Image (cartoon, rainbow, N blue to C red):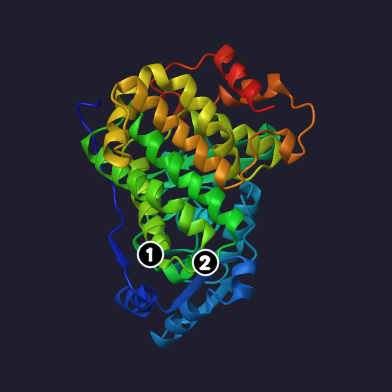
Amino acid sequence: MLKQYCLKLPKAVYSGEDATDKVAQVVAENKATKVCLFTDKALHKLGLADEAVRLIREAGAEVEVIDDIPAEPAYADVQAVVDRFKAMGADQIVAVGGGSVMDTAKLVAVLATDEYDIKDLLADPTKAKKQIRTLMIPTTAGTGAEATPNAIVAVPEDELKVGIVSNEMMADDVILDARMIKNLPRPIAASIGIDALCHAIECYTSTKANPLSDTFALEALDLILKNIIPACDDPEAMEAKRNMQLASFYAGIAITAAGTTAVHALSYPLGGRYHIAHGVSNAILLVPVFRFNEPAIRGRLATAYDRCVAGDAATDEGKSAAMIELLDKIVRHLDIPKNLGELGVENPDLDGLVEAGMKVTRLLVNNMREVTPEDARAIYQQII
């Protein structure tokens, strides 16, 4: 465990019943005169951004909407949005959406300058300097992007997704309103919920785990294990959905303090090469990676079992095995594909996957058990 550690948080978080009502207050407090609202076309069509637009105007500010943020954007997509934003003259960003929308908004907030562009940040994230205040309103319960200083972009020429990390991208304000996730389709709620599960349990078993990250990771894990199935299966299970939204936020906080591990590291090539949704690729790798890691994290998994499951297993080995079995049971219940074949991937380039996965050293160094190229190959072979 680290001897020194740090916790980073947004400046303000508003939650609870009808929390979206706080939009007007935030815009007024920031003295914003023109707001750019980021969302995607599906959410815009569903009307999820309408209330925020109304409240921005109620606060006396103009508002322009950018609603063509692509899912899991490439860095060139983000730069194109930056160029449009810079021509607007907006002095506040509001993001209403999932991880891709929030990540794009975070990047725009530091790229609204002529001093550097996104390629510069890919090479050196320390160049980032926040230019515009941001308000994040997640419409999913899983990415935790509202709580992190991270933004994920695809780099097509490398067939990889890359995380740009800078404290300058931490949100200024966050609104957690369960109404925003009420009508998520089950497949999306499931894959994104598993992403939050991965965040929580990976951070708890990271080499950088510490008392601060453990507090949020364990609480997130407890909430997710108890609520993910009803939240996905029952559209009216609002208490479970509220708990998943909080858990996603808590797991995002854990990421800032500890970081994810080999599940995320090995999943990035699946998204970059085969365009598999991030939550699905994490779900496919979750159990194989944790079975590989088990000898090195047995004690931590046993502690998590005592906190979150409290079943009949008596030994650390039994508790650890039961925890991994529970993860597998949840993934199977939520009908998430368990291998690349189910996703239509034929004859995957195993050498290419291993090579790309081993490049994600930012996360592999967090894994408690060293992952060699041979280990990565064996894990990938389990999901082919």
Identify the residue at the far right of this view. Answer: 346
Q: Which residue is mark 2?
A: 235
Give the CA separation, mark 2 to mark 1: 11 Å
Residue at 62% x, 50% y is 73
Mark 1 neighbour class, 10 Å CA radius: few under 14, some 14 to 19, many 20 or more:
few
At which x and y percent is residue 337?
Answer: 65, 40
Foreground residue, 1 or 235?
Answer: 235
Q: Do the numbered discs 2 and 1 sit on residues whose CB atoms are within 8 Å?
A: no
Is 284 positioned to the left or the right of 102 in the image? right
Residue 199: assigned label: none
Foreground residue, 248 or 189?
Answer: 189
At which x and y percent is residue 217?
Answer: 32, 42
Quarter of the image holding residue 58?
Answer: bottom left
At which x and y percent is residue 193?
Answer: 49, 50
- Vertical arrangement, residue 75 with respect to residue 262, above or below: below
- Vertical arrangement, residue 57 with respect to residue 91, above or below: below
Residue at 27% x, 31% y is 303
Residue type at mark 1 is Glu
At which x and y percent is residue 100?
Answer: 55, 54
Foreground residue, 84 or 68?
Answer: 68
Considering the numbered disc 1 on the image, is that residue within a helix, a strand or a loop?
helix
Quarter of the image with the C terminus in it? top right
Residue at 65% x, 28% y is 383
- Residue 315 appearing in the image: yes
Q: Which residue is mark 1?
A: 239
